């Protein structure tokens, strides 16, 4: 049976990322063609099953100055080749907008990439963890555990989401499993 909690005025189910009153977006493996580094492993995984990778329920109560939007996300465990399941990742349309992620359940991380310098870093995200994403920073969530990673992201109402910039160039780094642990590596040219 699902356990419901109260957060920010809405009931939510942490194990499904369902939240009453929100718009739900689901992304399947086929929606992330070109995002994983190993194209051959991607096609092999997709031929097996078009798995549900993640779901986000967004709450956007108002768009005025000072208002906040938030989303409840769940990213399922798995890998394409050696690369952990991930979200598309995005920049904010209003580049200076920051975001805060609150880990509710599971184990994973956020890949942060400074748009201006290109510097990348990983921040752990999971049960009881909080990650601050500064403005001008592309960010992508990755599940490095064996259970679903559930989190809430809170951002200014005027932030917007720019997925196109990431779709064009992707992130410079990839997170793969090596010897049973996550390792951040440079993305090879053309992948």
Image (cartoon, rainbow, N blue to C red):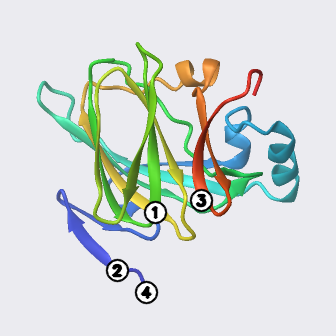
Q: Position of residue 143 (x, y in %)?
A: 53, 56
Label 4 packing within 10 angstroms: few (<14), some (14-19), many (20+): few
Residue 144 vertical placement versus 56 (above, below): below
Q: Residue at x 76, y 54 (%)?
A: 50
Tell me the residue that label 3 is attached to: 181
Tell me the residue that label 2 is attached to: 3
Give the label, 4 or 3, closer to the camera: 3
Can residue 4 be seen here? The reply is yes
Label 3 packing within 10 angstroms: few (<14), some (14-19), many (20+): few
Q: Mark 1 and mark 2: span between their CA atoms? A: 20 Å
Q: Position of residue 10 (x, y in %)?
A: 24, 61
**Element at label 4:** loop
Disc with the residue nearer the chain's start (3 vs 2)? 2
- 67 on left or right of 189: left
Tell me the residue that label 4 is attached to: 1
Label 2 packing within 10 angstroms: few (<14), some (14-19), many (20+): few
Q: Nearer the viewer, residue 128 or 177?
A: 177
**Quarter of the image that includes the N terminus:** bottom left
- Quick check: marks 1 and 4 in contact, CB under 8 Å? no
Residue 175 vertical placement versus 152 (above, below): above
Disc with the residue nearer the chain's start (1 vs 2)? 2
């Amino acid at each position: 049976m699902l356990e419901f909690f109260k957060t920010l005025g809405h009931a939510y189910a942490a194990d499904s990322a369902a939240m009453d009153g929100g718009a739900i977006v689901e992304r399947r493996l086929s929606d992330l063609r070109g995002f994983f580094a190993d194209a051959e492993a991607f096609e092999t995984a997709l031929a097996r099953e078009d798995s549900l990778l993640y779901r986000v329920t967004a709450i956007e109560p108002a768009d005025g100055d000072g208002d906040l939007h938030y989303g409840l996300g769940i990213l399922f465990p798995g890998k394409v080749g050696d690369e952990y399941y991930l979200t598309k990742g995005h920049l904010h349309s209003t580049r200076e907008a920051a975001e805060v992620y609150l880990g509710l359940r599971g184990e994973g991380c956020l890949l942060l990439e400074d748009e201006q310098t290109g510097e990348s870093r990983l921040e752990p995200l999971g049960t009881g963890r909080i990650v601050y994403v500064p403005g001008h920073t592309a960010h992508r969530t990755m599940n490095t555990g064996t259970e679903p990673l559930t989190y809430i992201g809170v951002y200014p109402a005027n932030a917007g989401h720019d997925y196109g910039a990431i779709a064009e160039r992707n992130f410079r780094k990839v997170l793969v499993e090596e010897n049973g642990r996550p390792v951040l590596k440079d993305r090879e040219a053309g992948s």
